[in-house]
Amino acid sequence: MSRVSTIWIDSGEPVPGLDRNPFPNLDMPFRYYGLVEVTHSTWGTAIRWDPLHAKRLSVENIVDRITAWTGPYTLIYYKQGWFKETLGSPAEAADRMLHIQSLDNVQILNTAFVKNFPINDQTLLPWLRDAHQDPGSVRDYCVEDLIDENEGTFRLGMVGDKSLFRQYVCTKQDDRTRVIPGNERWLDEIGPHYADVLQKWTPRLDHVVAALTSQEGEPMWRSWHRMVMPIKTSDGDFGVRSFVMKAPADIVIV
């Protein structure tokens, strides 16, 4: 009897100790956790994944190892429903997997969407209301950008340890002003709003949806409320202080 083996791949690496499907919902590992399942025996190999949620590193890991498993190769993937197709050679299966995965890597020209709202008790979430009344008391949660008077551009100054920007935009290194590669364009897109706050010298409340690059280099969409306030530092520099809070509901860009 041919022995059937199962391997789970997450973020480009096999998951240690996981050699079966322990999930109560069959879709859960693929459409919730983004895992890729490889089941193989002497009779053939089946690969199941959701290209929208699985990381490309996981697919590339399987492509690099696919010759170690016996054909034929059955690809089971999710595209508004589960589809199945079988290929005879490892090269065909590898090329097909990469093509299927690439169909979800769509280049979106706009990487940030900003909707402005008036500032009042109805539009401010409780935490942002506190920041509006006493911004100095919650400085650990803010980001400060200072304007270069000669260039007319903003540079990232202070990033509070508790700010969501520490998680979404900046690297984990000690240099708090170092941005994760891939996020520079998004930061450039929101600059004009900072200039508007300085010119009017009045706070601004936005709902922002932006495409960011994660610490692992994966694209992700995030949604948050942002209040931007004008500041003048003790050194006489002008800039803005942004307070950010994750939006109550995620927004999915289709």
Image: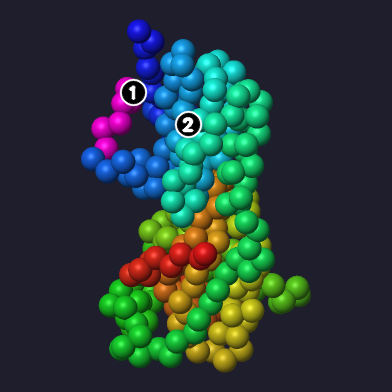
Callout 2, which amino acid? Ile
Quote the CA–CA distance across marks 2 and 1: 14 Å
Task: Please name the residue that numbered disc 2 is placed on.
Answer: 47
Q: Amino acid at mark 1?
A: Asp
Mark nearest the camera among 2 and 1 is 2
Q: In the depicted view, which residue is nearer to us: 103 or 244? A: 103
- Which is nearer the eye, 59 or 95? 95
- Rendered view: 203 above or below 246: below
- Confirm whether residue 142 shows in the render: no
Q: Earlier in the sequence, mark 2 or mark 1?
A: 1
Residue 19 - label = 1
Residue nearest the viewer, comparing 251 with 82: 82
The magenta segment is 17-23
Q: In the image, is residue 21 part of the stretch drawn in magenta?
A: yes
**Cβ atoms under marks 2 and 1 closer than 8 Å:** no
Q: Position of residue 128 (x, y in %)?
A: 35, 77
| Disc 1 residue crowd, few under 14, some 14–19, many 20+, Cα 10 Å | some
- Is 102 left, or right, of 214 in this rendering? right
User: Judging from the image, what secondary structure is the residue with disc 2 in?
Assistant: strand
Report the residue at 66% width, 26% height from top. Answer: 91
Q: Which mark is residue 194?
A: none
